[in-house]
Image (cartoon, helix red, strand yellow):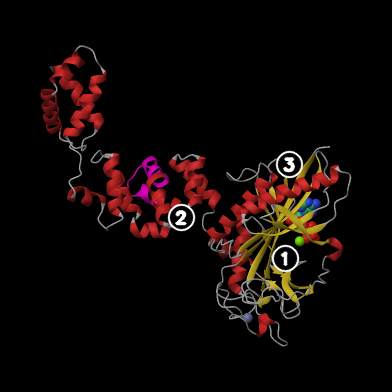
């Protein structure tokens, strides 16, 4: 029997706020352990939570960017379980009445999107737990330590329907995760830092016989914090499930973890061991009300989303899909830089070539992001350089030189060309003079050319270029040389 994968994702993204979800503690990563704690996030008796308005705004914007319906009233709930990183004994989340539901990532809506719709089931607010430290201490072999700086940091959880299926499902799931990352970063809701755990994904994986509409038993793979891990874990898990089924055994519903070095998933707990969270509405918080006027304001505040930016770049500037992907993804903000360069008078084609060529190489070499690139070489200055090439004032190898020099000073391209005497010889009479000189000194070659040895022409062009120290356009030399030879 042939099986196909069926996959749904749950993505947790830390919201970019100064303070935690329900208290005034700093939410910033990297402080010494337990530096950011207070009675509220420690769950001390009598401490009262207060909803972080900025976190709500971020979550609403994320919901709108995903086409969700934002509900005027949503309700925080207690999700009860015991774990040493959870001092309160419960996590405040949203359960029966989430902030937003029913979003959609339409089929083929962007270069990464699957050829089928991916529905967003829900998007809700919650708080993060703390972190157990199992390594790095002298007695780590015997003890674990708890850092509660992350306890209470605001998260948004985004849950998809199990819509990824068939051929390429793992790849599309990873692409959607990448898209969500880009989207959340674009609206400044998340910092996109997966290594620090700001963004992580749980993959729910099942398989079913091709043609069947019923969902199979699912396995949840927890805490995947890279696109590669997500794709590899899903691929491995699908193969494992198909092996279990084809050998006539039954799958059990369980939670598994991805072991990146062994390249396999390993069981963490089965459904029987799963928590019964005993959700109930959080008695210390009122329902969260986000009225229509606030939703409208937040909607108006959204920047152009990446998919729209890409379509705009393709249609307005005649770029290909791959070029646009590189401009919008490889370095965030490079697409804006591109458009500003074009606005400053460079052609789209040349600008694209510079950005994807020399500029990108320079950024890689120096480790610059777009802001750092701007500090050293703003779009107007790059446009100035490109215009000199397009006007034929300098050729492309000189331009590379000038480009490098532009990083060493604030001078613009024209100044550098003038100061270094790099401008090409453009004056026809000066080029003609050089040609006459070369023809006079290369009588043999001229004779050969006239006997029909066409290859000699290239040699003569080379001699003229040399006489001009390369500061002349070869096409122009060819044209004038041909005229000179014909006139002999
Ligand atoms: P749970 O109650 O275990 O959290 P849910 O039904 O709420 O399960 O779904 C959680 C996630 O699992 C969602 O992303 C959903 O799309 C996905 N999911 C549910 N059932 C399946 C299945 N059989 N195969 C793959 N994914 C599934
Ligand atoms: Mg779940
Ligand atoms: Zn606190």
**Which residue is label 1 attached to?**
98
Q: Nearer the viewer, mark 2 or mark 1?
A: 2
Q: CA distance from mark 3 to mark 1?
A: 30 Å
**Which residue is label 3 attached to?**
166
Whether residue 94 is in magenta: the answer is no
Q: Write down the quadrant of residue 246 in the picture.
A: top right
Residue at the spot 65% in from the left edge and 65% down from the top edge: 156
Question: Neighbour class for label 3 at 10 Å: few (<14), some, many (≥20)?
Answer: some
Q: CA distance from mark 2 to mark 1?
A: 33 Å
Magenta-colored span: 340-356
Residue 339 seen in render = no
Q: Nearer the viewer, mark 3 or mark 1?
A: 3
Q: CA distance from mark 3 to mark 2?
A: 34 Å
What SS does tag 3 mark? loop
Q: Nearer the viewer, mark 3 or mark 2?
A: 3
Question: Neighbour class for label 1 at 10 Å: few (<14), some, many (≥20)?
Answer: many
| Percent position of residue 44, x then y | 71, 85
Q: Which quarter of the rendered picture does the N terminus lie within? A: top right
**Which residue is label 2 attached to?**
333
Residue in the foreground of this view, choosing between 76 and 88: 88
């Amino acid at each position: 029997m042939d099986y196909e994968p069926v996959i749904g994702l749950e993505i947790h993204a830390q919201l970019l706020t100064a303070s935690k979800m329900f208290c005034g503690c700093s939410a910033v990563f990297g402080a010494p352990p337990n530096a950011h704690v207070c009675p509220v996030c420690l769950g001390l008796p009598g401490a009262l939570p207060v909803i972080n308005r900025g976190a709500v705004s971020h979550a609403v914007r994320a919901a709108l960017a995903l086409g969700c319906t934002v509900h005027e009233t949503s309700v925080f709930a207690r999700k009860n379980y015991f774990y040493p990183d959870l001092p309160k004994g419960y996590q405040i989340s949203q359960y029966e009445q989430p902030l937003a539901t029913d979003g959609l990532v339409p089929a083929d809506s962007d270069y990464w999107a699957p050829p089928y719709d991916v529905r967003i089931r829900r998007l809700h607010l919650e708080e993060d737990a703390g972190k157990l430290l199992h390594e790095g201490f002298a007695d780590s072999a015997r003890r674990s330590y708890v850092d509660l700086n992350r306890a209470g940091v605001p998260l948004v959880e985004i849950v998809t329907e199990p819509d990824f299926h068939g051929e390429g499902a793992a790849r599309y799931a990873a692409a959607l995760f990448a898209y969500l990352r880009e989207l959340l970063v674009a609206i400044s809701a998340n910092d996109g830092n997966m290594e620090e755990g700001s963004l992580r994904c749980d993959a729910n994986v099942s398989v079913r016989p091709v043609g069947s509409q019923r969902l199979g038993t699912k396995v949840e793979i927890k805490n995947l914090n890279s696109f590669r891990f997500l794709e590899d874990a899903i691929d491995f898990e699908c193969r494992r499930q198909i092996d279990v089924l084809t050998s006539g055994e039954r799958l059990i519903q369980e939670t598994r973890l991805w072991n990146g070095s062994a390249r396999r998933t390993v069981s963490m707990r089965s459904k029987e061991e799963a928590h019964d969270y005993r959700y109930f509405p959080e008695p210390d918080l009122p329902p969260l009300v986000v009225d229509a006027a606030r939703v409208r304001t937040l909607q108006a505040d959204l920047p152009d989303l990446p998919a729209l930016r890409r379509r705009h770049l393709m249609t307005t500037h005649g770029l290909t899909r791959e070029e646009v992907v590189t401009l919008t993804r490889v370095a965030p903000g490079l697409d804006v830089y591109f458009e500003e360069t074009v606005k400053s008078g460079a052609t789209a084609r040349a600008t694209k070539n510079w950005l994807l060529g020399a500029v990108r190489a320079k950024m890689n070499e120096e480790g610059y992001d777009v802001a750092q690139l701007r500090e050293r070489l703003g779009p107007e200055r790059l446009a100035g350089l490109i215009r000199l090439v397009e006007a034929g004032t300098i050729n492309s190898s000189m331009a590379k030189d000038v480009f490098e020099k532009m990083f060493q000073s604030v001078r613009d391209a024209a100044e550098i060309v003038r100061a270094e005497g790099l401008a090409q010889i453009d004056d026809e009479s000066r080029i003609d003079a050089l040609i006459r000189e070369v023809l006079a000194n290369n009588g043999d070659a001229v004779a050969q050319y006239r006997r029909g040895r066409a290859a000699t022409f290239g040699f003569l062009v080379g001699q003229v270029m040399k006489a001009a120290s390369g500061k002349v356009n070869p096409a122009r030399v060819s044209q004038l040389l041909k005229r000179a030879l014909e006139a002999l």
